[in-house]
Image (cartoon, grey):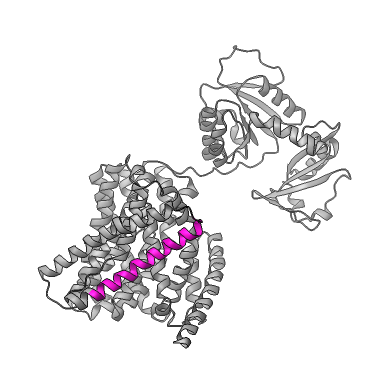
């Protein structure tokens, strides 16, 4: 026993080191726009028994508790996404599209897999009952989707609209229902594979199992989670209790199954995934602890997923890949076909627009945690063919991870619901600025910019003749602040646009500039502070008049010289942001740069990131250099840096 415990401790320690390394390696995958999960699985495969061998063959069984904790956590996360109040507006479309992607995909997938059994090695030698079991289990896994992957794509594109809202609703509802569906299929498969004749008693036991799972999950575990979340204890202790609760669902499930088998001759198995998802659903919809619960799930997710997906990769039977890759591609083709049929069926019944129906299957391709979790359950439940099944499913998931996100992005582009930033226009050699809103401050700003060499125009919705136009500042009159009107005044060639209207009008214009024009700098004069986050999300620079004076006085007290330079109060001195456009200076180090003696470089910004500069910092085209010096010297530097 001491030797066994010593070996397990060594195994846990070694796996922890591998998991930490896997987390760092997987982040490199994100840099080439691949999902984090793909990197974790890849690292697990490389460190597993079939390549480097850092994780031995027996690790999966010895570390099974990691799988059980992670699977329960995935179920908690899936249940937390099912929040009814956020699904009301598109409930009709969500209902029918869920029907198409769940029922149609499952039924059609089961039938096609059953008839394709002769082409699937681990199914070819099974009897008809076992083939039915494998078919329905595979089709149940087909239905699983990845909410995390969907949210990542939506956030990346800032997508918003009826199509995206329906997709998120269907994804979340499916993730709940797929576990219910899988629980039924798993229980039915165990009856079929054990070779017993199907009896009404077995059906009754199955219904009892599902009923008990619902009751225990919703009431017992749901109440426990609510109680833990209300305790006035440190959050890390709450996390520990939640993880223990998830693991206990598996522990008690096995204990109850063994006890009922011994005492009554019939095994009653509570489905732990169903228990956990119902508990999470209870907390999300029927308690005031939802925000904290979501925060815990978000903060705890990374280490749990790292451990689970790394161990999953290490369990990947690499030696059978040549045998299963063909099967994985076959299942991928079947899944895509069933999803297309399901997409058209659901869209037709929901009376969605034709464009939505054509693209309605694309958002649901990507799979991740839930599908892997279900495959792991099958592998543990049916050892004879389960490992081959899991290996094929992992290969299928990896294919889906590569194909799914790009297709989902394309679908969002096609329906016009992306709100990603437009490409910043090329610098045309002239520094242009547009000030939106006519008032005394806008005129004063325009004059000051002109004194510093900028071409400035003021855009206004006021009627022509309503005020006296300044002679030296061109004024453009617009009927409305639309894309067409802004293009007419050459906003697409401007380096900066200053918005000085109401917050509502400013936000509408900032959104339009962000999505359709891509102007580098949008400066907003804020009217109400609670709107600041909306402008920050669009990358706008915000000036809050209510705090600007206080901040300025603070800087005058602490750094009078810097504040004087900033405001141009030092005679003949100024600060300036200069963009490097001269290709001859590309790659030159700061120490080799010939600048006027009174110019000091304060910072270099590259790709939105400020670089800590030193003499050996190399400049790149489109770097923004902040410099301080005399106006004459800065003009000379500006000339050197321009094309």
Residue 326 in view here: yes
Q: State how many labels appear.
A: 0
x then y, percent, for residue 348? 24, 46
x then y, percent, for residue 175? 33, 57
Taking depth in this image into account, of 60 and 97 the one nearest to the observer is 60
Taking depth in this image into account, of 14 and 605 the one nearest to the observer is 14
Q: Is residue 349 above or below residue 365?
A: above
Residue drawn at the location 41% of the way across and 58% of the way down: 404
Q: Quadrant of the C terminus?
A: top right
Q: Residue furthest front?
A: 232
629 horizontally vs 462: left or right: right
Picture quadrant where residue 389 is located: bottom left
152 horizontally vs 248: left or right: right
Taking depth in this image into account, of 7 and 368 the one nearest to the observer is 7
Q: Quadrant of the N terminus?
A: bottom left
Residue drawn at the location 51% of the way across and 32% of the way down: 508
Q: Is residue 292 above or below residue 498?
A: below
Q: Main secondary structure of the magenta part?
A: helix
| Segment colored magenta | 233-259
Q: Residue furthest right?
A: 597
Taking depth in this image into account, of 398 and 41 the one nearest to the observer is 41
x then y, percent, for residue 265? 17, 77
Q: Is residue 622 above or below residue 257?
A: above
x then y, percent, for residue 623? 70, 49
Q: Is residue 511 above or below residue 317?
A: above
């Amino acid at each position: 026993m001491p030797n066994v415990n010593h070996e397990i401790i060594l195994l846990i320690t070694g796996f922890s080191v591998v998991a930490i390394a896997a987390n760092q390696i997987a982040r490199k995958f994100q840099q080439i726009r691949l999902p984090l999960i793909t990197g974790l699985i890849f690292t697990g495969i490389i460190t597993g028994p079939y390549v480097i061998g850092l994780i031995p063959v027996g690790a999966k069984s010895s570390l099974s508790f990691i799988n059980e904790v992670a699977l329960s956590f995935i179920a908690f996360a899936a249940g937390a996404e099912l929040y009814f109040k956020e699904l009301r507006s598109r409930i009709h479309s969500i209902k029918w599209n869920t029907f198409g992607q769940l029922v149609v995909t499952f039924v059609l997938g089961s039938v096609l897999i059953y008839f394709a059994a002769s082409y699937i090695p681990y199914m070819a030698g099974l009897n008809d009952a076992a083939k039915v079991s494998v078919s329905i289990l595979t089709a149940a896994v087909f239905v699983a989707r990845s909410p995390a992957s969907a949210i990542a794509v939506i956030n990346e594109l800032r997508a918003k609209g009826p199509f995206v809202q329906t997709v998120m609703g269907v994804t979340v509802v499916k993730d709940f229902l797929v576990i219910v569906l899988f629980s039924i299929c798993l229980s039915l498969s165990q009856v079929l594979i054990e070779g017993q004749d199907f009896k009404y008693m077995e059906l009754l036991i199955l219904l009892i199992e599902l009923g008990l799972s619902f009751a225990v999950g919703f009431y017992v575990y749901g109440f426990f989670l609510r109680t833990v979340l209300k305790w006035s204890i440190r959050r890390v202790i709450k996390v520990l209790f939640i993880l223990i609760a998830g693991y206990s669902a598996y522990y008690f499930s096995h204990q109850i199954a063994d006890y009922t088998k011994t005492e009554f001759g019939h095994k009653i198995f509570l489905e732990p995934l169903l228990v956990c998802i119902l508990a999470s659903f209870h907390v999300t919809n029927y308690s005031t602890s939802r925000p904290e619960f979501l925060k815990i799930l978000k903060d705890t997710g990374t280490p749990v997923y790292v451990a689970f997906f790394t161990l999953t990769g290490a369990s990947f039977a690499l030696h059978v890949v040549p045998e299963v890759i063909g099967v994985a591609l076959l299942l991928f083709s079947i899944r895509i076909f069933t999803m297309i049929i399901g997409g058209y069926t659901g869209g037709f019944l929901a009376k969605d627009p034709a464009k939505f129906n054509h693209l309605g299957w694309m958002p649901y391709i990507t799979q991740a945690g839930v599908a892997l979790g279900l495959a792991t359950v099958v592998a543990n439940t049916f050892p004879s063919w389960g490992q081959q099944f899991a290996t094929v499913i992992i290969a299928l998931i990896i294919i889906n991870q590569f194909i799914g996100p790009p297709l989902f992005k394309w679908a969002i582009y096609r329906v016009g619901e992306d709100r990603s930033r437009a490409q910043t226009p090329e610098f045309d050699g002239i520094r242009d600025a547009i000030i939106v809103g006519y008032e005394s401050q806008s005129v004063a700003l325009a004059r000051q910019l002109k004194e510093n060499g900028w071409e400035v125009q003021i855009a206004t919705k006021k009627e022509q003749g309503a005020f006296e136009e300044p002679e030296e500042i061109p004024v453009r009159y617009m009927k409305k602040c639309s894309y067409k009107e802004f293009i007419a005044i050459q906003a697409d060639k401007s380096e900066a646009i200053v918005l000085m209207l109401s917050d509502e009008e400013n936000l509408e214009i900032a959104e339009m500039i962000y999505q359709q024009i891509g102007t580098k700098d949008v400066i907003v004069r804020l009217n109400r502070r609670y709107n600041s986050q909306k402008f920050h999300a669009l990358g706008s620079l915000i000036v809050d008049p209510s705090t600007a004076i206080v901040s300025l006085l603070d800087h005058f007290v602490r750094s009078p010289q810097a504040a004087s330079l900033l405001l141009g109060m030092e005679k003949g001195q100024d600060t300036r942001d200069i963009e490097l456009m001269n290709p001859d200076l590309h790659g030159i180090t700061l120490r080799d740069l010939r600048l006027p003696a009174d110019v000091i470089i304060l910072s270099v910004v590259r790709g939105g990131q400020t670089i800590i500069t030193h003499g050996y910092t190399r400049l790149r085209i489109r770097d923004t250099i902040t410099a301080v010096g005399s106006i004459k010297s800065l003009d000379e530097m500006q000339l050197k840096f321009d094309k």
